[in-house]
Amino acid sequence: MTNYRRMYIPNATWFFTVNLAERKNNRLLVEQITHLRQAFRSITQRHPFTIDAIVVLPDHLHCLWTLPAGDADYSTRWNVLKGYFSRTIAKGESRTESRQGKRERGLWQRRFWAHWITDAADFNRHVDYIHWNPVKHGWAKRVADWPYSRFHRFVRPGVYPVDWGVADAVDFETGEYMQRVTRVRWCGAA
């Protein structure tokens, strides 16, 4: 079995990418957004953490989480969240023999991408990436048009202008806004 090495740092901020197992033509996450929101509410009550930014796309999601002091266990949180969501969805997805043998559902990819946020610039780059993602993938023409994002929570206090992420204002190669704006104050672990 592959030995995945992960860092576990209490009170750290992490960027995650989590994918559905079958991504092609799959809109499950947005079609079942109510169940996904319930899964997030459930896990944040049982294992508290802060969702700093999030975007849900039809077949994957990106988010930034800050874990509480003395707590580094993001893996359990993802395991519980994926399980909660999976139990709310009718069975019928294709499953490999391996998944059948382990009595696993076939909704999610088993692993996820995790990146430790090291400083304010890293945090800001990932917040930009999260919010730009629906435009990058062609799901929206403007960041503000995508309903499954916390972008508007950044607009209200003036962190972003409402028109941030309009095609002519963003570098298509990097996804970065041409005019830098002041971002949220980052308070991650050192």
Image (spheres, grey):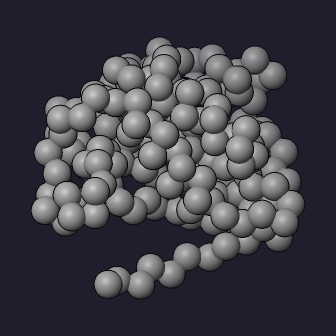
Q: Report which quarter residue 86 is drawn in.
A: top left
Q: Position of residue 157 (x, y in %)?
A: 81, 22
Residue 140, compared with residue 177, is above or below; it is above
Q: Position of residue 159 (x, y in %)?
A: 75, 30
Along the line of sight, the residue nearer the viewer: 105 or 57: 105
Q: Position of residue 125 (x, y in %)?
A: 60, 50
Residue 123, compared with residue 91, is above or below; it is below
Q: Quadrant of the N terminus?
A: bottom left
Is 69 left, or right, of 122 in this rendering?
A: right
Q: How many marks?
A: 0
The structure residue drawn at horizontal position 49% and vertical position 40%, both measured from the top left corner, is: 84
The structure residue drawn at horizontal position 73% and vertical position 71%, both measured from the top left corner, is: 9
Residue 119 visible here: no
Residue 33, compared with residue 120, is above or below; it is above
Residue 21 visible here: yes
Is 12 left, or right, of 41 in this rendering?
A: right
Is 91 left, or right, of 124 in this rendering?
A: left
Q: Position of residue 10 (x, y in %)?
A: 78, 67
The structure residue drawn at horizontal position 21% and vertical position 45%, both measured from the top left corner, is: 22
Residue 82, compared with residue 190, is above or below; it is above
The structure residue drawn at horizontal position 71% and vertical position 57%, both measured from the top left corner, is: 13
Along the line of sight, the residue nearer the viewer: 107 or 22: 107
Q: Quadrant of the C terminus?
A: bottom right
